[in-house]
Amino acid sequence: MQESSSSQRSSAESVYAAPYVSGDPYADYRDASFPFTRLTDLADRRLGAAVVATNDEFFAERENLLSRTPAVFDVHDYGNKGKVMDGWETRRRRGTDGANPFPADSDHDWALIRLGAPGIIRGIIVDTAHFRGNFPQQVSIRAAAFEGTPSAAEVLRDSGSWHEILPRTPVRGHAANGFAIASERRWTHLLIRQHPDGGIARLRVHGEVVPDPAWLALLGTVDVACVTNGGSVQDTSDGFYSSPGNTIMPGLSQKQDDGWETRRRRDKGNDWIVYRLAAQSEIRAVEVDTANLKGNAAGWVSLSVKDGESGTWTEVLSRVPLQPDALHRLPLRAPATATHARLDVYPDGGLARLRLHGALTAAGGAELAGRAARAQQD
């Protein structure tokens, strides 16, 4: 039975967004809440992720996909190729001739992404913000794991390494399209396909970092809290102005919102962050950096650790004062064995980076090696 025109119109309206008229271009944006977004974005440019190749970027460059800021829209911004869009956009596909004007079912455009940190993907956001009538009809995603740093040509040529983690799935225009991923494998690269053509504003790939245990063992002393080494934020009291996850990002903070900042407290409590370390580790030294936080840095800080989820918290760094916009190097009196750390700041404020320098214990190295081995299996 043929679908009625009214039901066809209703279905289209659920996919398309209304044309932009004026005012806030995000006013009718279809946002959504996904539990996996609390996890690390493995495709974060600050971790070294990149869009290394694409078959077409006629209207808008592939690099926009991994931009950290929300997509912007200027209704009057046109260039020599047409409307300037803040995303990745390909040209319109056509059929073979006038009698067959539509693209074939197999026609698609693609972009190759190298993740900034290898890991298990728990969810993906395909954000089509401001792509109202020019978004893809469907998307699909494949993933692969490669050692070292192969070229784009090498990874594309190795067809046997690619596995489909998201089959062809419809997406909506001007919306956050979220997809939970069931695979337990450790991946290093993604191939996103849009069917048959169109544009995507942003791509976010949330998951759990699974570092190379052999590399960490070779280095010896590492930052066991850093996200690229497998550390993560487990909980926090407040992330009002900026994310606590910023505190364990690699590199130096470049501006105020590249760190962690809380709202101003009006009670007698304090703010805190709980971290899960890469694995059981022996911590020997701490760095607390308040770079770019000048009138809003935390006043004091202390550090506690525990060994295991059910372990008891033990303070290993008593409350010490912080200076604004400064690096603080704080050696521990004795090495501390831990799987988790808790940073308390008094009374509120923020900091840019936390570094916990140490090494994996024998048990921690074995646990991480087992985790990595399991994530290599089908």
Image (spheres, grey):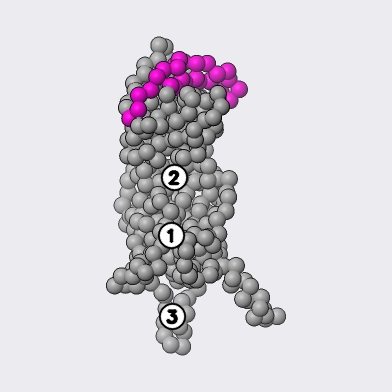
Disc 3, SS: loop
The image shows residue 217 at horizontal and vertical percentages of: 38, 27
Residue in the picture at 49% in, 35% down? 263
Residue at mark 3: 95
Which contiguous range is marked in magenta? Answer: 300-325
Residue in the picture at 44% in, 45% down? 42
Q: Nearer the viewer, mark 3 or mark 2?
A: 2
Disc 1, SS: loop
Of all residues shown, which one is farthest toward the top? 333
Label 3 to label 2: alpha-carbon separation: 37 Å
Residue at mark 1: 201
Front in this rendered view, residue 159 or 47: 47
Residue at mark 2: 42
Q: Earlier in the sequence, mark 3 or mark 2?
A: 2
Label 1 to label 2: alpha-carbon separation: 17 Å
User: Which of the image's four quarters has the N terminus?
Assistant: bottom right
